[in-house]
Structure formats: C-alpha cells, structure tokens
Image (cartoon, helix red, strand yellow):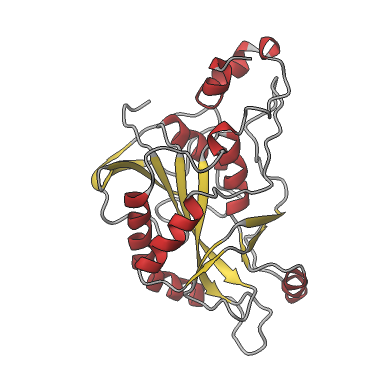
Amino acid sequence: MTEARAEIGILGGSGLYALAGLDAPVEARVTTPFGAPSEPPVVGTIEGRRVAFLARHGRHHRLTPSEINYRANLFALKSLGVERIYSASAVGSMRETIAPRDVVVPDQLIDRTCGRAATFFGDGIAAHVSLADPFCPELSPALAAAAREAGARVHAGGTYLCMEGPAFSTRAESRLYRSWGVDIIGMTNLTEAKLAREAEICYVTLALVTDYDCWHDAEEDVSVEALLGHLRANAELAARALRRAVATTPRARVGCACGQALSAAVVTAREEIPPAARERLAPILGRWLSAAP
C-alpha cells in the first residue's frame, strides 16, 4: 500500500471526476480485502489539509451505481487515514421549491436499493451501527455554509431517497416517493453513508440538483442530456464549495459521535473474533480493539 496519507476524503459523483485546486496530487495505490476501488484515490493538499479524492463512477464514468464497489472505495479512504468524507452527487428534485442547479445538504435517507454489499461485517464478526442520523451533524452545516459562500442556492436538510438504478423512476414511483415526503432522489449516498458509519468516518453530501425526476407536469422528464447540462454548469461551483469546506473543516472531531460508532455496535466478543476477520478489518477495528473492554 502507498505511503500517502489524508485526513479528508472527497467522493466525486456524476460530472465531478477530478478536483481542481488539489496541490501536488499523487495516485495512492491501495489494496483492499474487498477488491479494487473505482479508481486509485488521488492524494494532495488544499489549504494545508491532506485530501484524498476518489471518483466513485471512475474517471471516465464507466461504473453504474449498482456496479460501484462501495466497500473498496470506503475501505481505501479509511486505509489512507481519512476521518471525514465530503460527497458530491447528482440528484433529482421531488419538491417544487427545489429547482435544478440548487444544492441540497440532506440530513436523512431512505433505502430503496436491493442486493448491494453494504456492510464490512459478517464472516466471523457481527456489528449493528446506529444510522438514525446518517449524516454528520458537525460537517453538514459547515458544508451548507461553504456552498452558500461559493454562490449556490442551498437547502439545508431534507430526505434523500436512494434508488437502485440505473434506470430512472417510473412516473408512479416518482409520485409515490413525493407522497412519502422525500425531497431529493439519487442512486449512491445511502450505501456510502452506511459504510462510512461502520468505518467511524464522518459523512456528508453536497447534492447537486439536475432535474425534477418525472413527477412534474410542466417540466421535461429527466434525461441524460439535460442532466449532463446541469452538471457541467454546477461542476465549478461544487469544486469551489468542496475546497471551501475542506479549508474550514475543524481539526478535531468534537461536535459528533461518528468516530465512536463501533463503541456499542459490535456484538461478537473480542476473544471470539477470528484472526482472519481481525486482519481483514484492521483499519476499521483498530480503535475498537485497542479500547478497554
């Protein structure tokens, strides 16, 4: 594994395949027990902070949301020392008041995925983390403030529904989700948030609105052409917001409990955890194993 280290991770989504302003970038070749990440993370510096950028779909967008190796991506960032992750992702709006090219920093998630590998645990060790509040309460307001300073129209809070994809919603599904009180819809963040919590990493997302899904009678249905147009317009704004968020990230994690997520989550007794599981999950279990029982 590379010697490169980082304290902050950025997961780039559709339209954000590299991060402008990352000084002295180098590729970090990281191996994981879950296979290869989407791309080797690129590690560099922003305002004196060590940052690892990873394009979740690959630099040339070759992976669908269902094909992304989420476990490898999150494990790779954890192995580099990352304690906080800022995610950027394209979403559809489920609200009249949330328009394309707006930005949402959600605080809740609904899972409509199926069949994804969404836990590091199993194979000799069981754990059940709390996901009641899936996004970091310290980073979320900081990210919203950074996006406003970058010139975005920001909606702080809201529920993100994560669907499987890669096809977009049917009209009936879109209307159903609106009746549930959903604010935005996407295909990636739920899986990342679950794994980040298991890895005791703070996680928050900058959701870039590209469309009204297909519920809005007066707007065209979501299409790749329209989506990419809005993403290109938002890419520079997103990069500015993320750089600002990195620069203002507190050095110490004192405003959240994300870094202690495993404290009351692991069910398996320490002495019963197989050596192979200890070795496989060493970057994730290290703090918990060294803590006094």
Q: Nearer the viewer, residue 221 or 88?
A: 88
Taking the view exactly as shown, the residue that stands out farthest to the left is 24
Q: Residue at x 58, y 48 (%)?
A: 67
Compared with 116, 261 (above or below) is above
Compared with 20, 274 (above or below) is above
* Position in image of residue 265 (x %, y %): 68, 29
Compared with 213, 198 (above or below) is above
Tell me how many marks there are.
Answer: 0
Q: Is residue 221 left or right of residue 149?
A: right
Q: Is residue 61 visible?
A: no
Taking the view exactly as shown, the residue that stands out farthest to the bottom is 218
* Position in image of residue 135 (x %, y %): 57, 50
Compared with 11, 281 (above or below) is above
Q: Residue at x 66, y 83 (%)?
A: 216
* Position in image of residue 260 (x %, y %): 57, 32
Taking the view exactly as shown, the residue that stands out farthest to the front is 254
Q: Residue at x 31, y 31 (%)?
A: 4
Q: Residue at x 78, y 74 (%)?
A: 172
Taking the view exactly as shown, the residue that stands out farthest to the top is 271
Q: Nearer the viewer, residue 130 or 211?
A: 130
Q: Nearer the viewer, residue 64 or 16?
A: 16
* Position in image of residue 1 (x %, y %): 38, 25
On the image, which quarter does residue 15 sit in? Answer: bottom left
On the image, which quarter does residue 291 sit in? Answer: top right
Q: Is residue 14 visible?
A: yes
Which quadrant, please, contains the C terminus?
A: top right
